[in-house]
Image (tube, grey):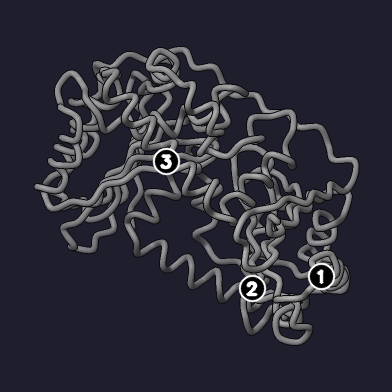
Amino acid sequence: MNIESKVLKNGLKIYAINLNDNSGVASVNIFYKVGSSYEELGKSGIAHLLEHLSFKSTKTHKAGEFDEIIKALGGVNNACTSFDYTQYYVNIANIHIKRVLELYSSMMSELLFNKDEFYKERDVVLEEERLRVGNDAFGYLYNAIYNYAFIKTSYHWTPIGFADDIANLTPKIVKEFYTKFYAPNNACIVISGDLANIDIFGMCEEIFSKKSAKKITQNKVYEPDRTGLKEIELSFPNLNSNIFACAYKIPAFNHEDFEYLKAISIFLNLDKNSIIKNKMINEYNLCADLDFYAQSSKNENLFIIFGVCNDLVNTKSAIKQLKKLINQTKFNKFDTRTIYNQLELSINQVKSNPSALASGIGKFECFGDVNVFLNSLTSKELDYKILNQVFKKYLKDDNLTQIILKEKV
């Protein structure tokens, strides 16, 4: 694997990752350093709606033509919006890389915001919000976690946005956001796969060099320190079992504790090794499922535990037992060896996957330090003493937002 990078005069960062695998396949990505956390209250959902609109009419392409061209070339494309970035990606034969870059160029500066297309796509996004949040218990719970855990910052809402906000978005509002943030100096192109004898930098120079840089206002996020436990009970229709979430505030992606929190989440999700999971599901018969996630972002985020309670189980009692197990848990040297093996497996999978490599580099470039990702591709055994310290430091009540979701009656 050979990673090279270059920055054009207009600020566009380019990464070329040659896997030397003779596959003839490449993953072609463009990332914009803007996501839902750059929105403001009352105008949530802009970044996600803009992601959808980016496949509509431009000065040089008709609505839907992007998808048609990629499909005709045998490729697969999609996009996603997070708190801190928006990603567009195409997996395709490497002989078509230049064609994909030309499409990305049109997307960067030529969107037309046709009113008919805009309002149709806004309805599509509203339907997506209804299905993912309004009609899905876990989506509703996930959304609620951020609504209650973050009060002062734009992490208060998830990238899907609030339905009422989306319904009030106009072409003018979204175009202003696009004009402000979609610029070469606020983007990076990441291409990985079989790149032998392909001049990636020359292609990008030819296609993007004439685009002008813009003054970008960096997002400032500040959330006051937590001062106590938040306990919330919500209801949801037609819920078969009570579900809950315990969300602990954790630091940003580049904090020294984050790699330990990520390791903890990996270990606690292992069915055979996680004492907490085994006892809650198999021994105490309190939960049908229990999952752990250390969420990474440019700013502080959450360590989330999702639980599905068994029938007739008191949800508060289940959470109380979960907290007791958390307080009793101590990691040892054997646990760190298990974590090391799991990380080694994950690293090898990423290194051999062009899409995963490109996504990792682009994501962390948008976060602000790609070296954090590159360093994570080298295995190292963690100190179990620090593992215990970090676990106790963050998974405690005064750092917790606790939500119980019950059936609406």
Separation (CA) of disc 2 from disc 1: 15 Å
Q: What residue type is labelled 1?
A: Asn
Q: In this view, does 128 lie above or below 210?
A: below
Instruction: Name which quarter of the figure residue 290 lies in.
Output: bottom right
- Say if mark 2 contacts mark 1, CB within 8 Å: no
The tag earlier along the polypeptide, 2 or 1, is: 2
Per the image, the residue denoted by label 3 is: 127
Q: Position of residue 119 (x, y in %)?
A: 34, 25
Q: What element carries label 1?
A: loop
Task: Say which quarter of the image contains residue 289.
Answer: bottom right
Disc 3 from disc 2: Cα separation = 28 Å
Disc 2 secondary structure class: strand
Residue ID for mark 1: 314
Amino acid, disc 2 = Asp
Q: Is residue 290 visible?
A: yes
Mark 3: secondary structure: helix
Q: In this view, does 312 lie to the left or right of 328?
A: left
Q: Which residue lies furthest to the bottom in this view?
A: 283
Residue at horizontal 21%, vertical 25%?
Answer: 57
Residue closer to the observer: 347 or 154: 154
Q: Residue at x 37, y 21 (%)?
A: 183
Separation of residues labelled 1 and 3 (CA atoms) = 34 Å
Q: Position of residue 381 (x, y in %)?
A: 64, 69
Residue at coordinates 31% horizontally, 44% vertically from top-left?
Answer: 89
Q: Which of marks 3 and 2 is in front?
A: 3
Pointer 2 residue:
289
Marked residue nearer the N-terminal end (1 or 3): 3
The amino acid marked with disc number 3 is: Glu
Apparent side of residue 315 relative to residue 128 in the rendered image (left or right): right
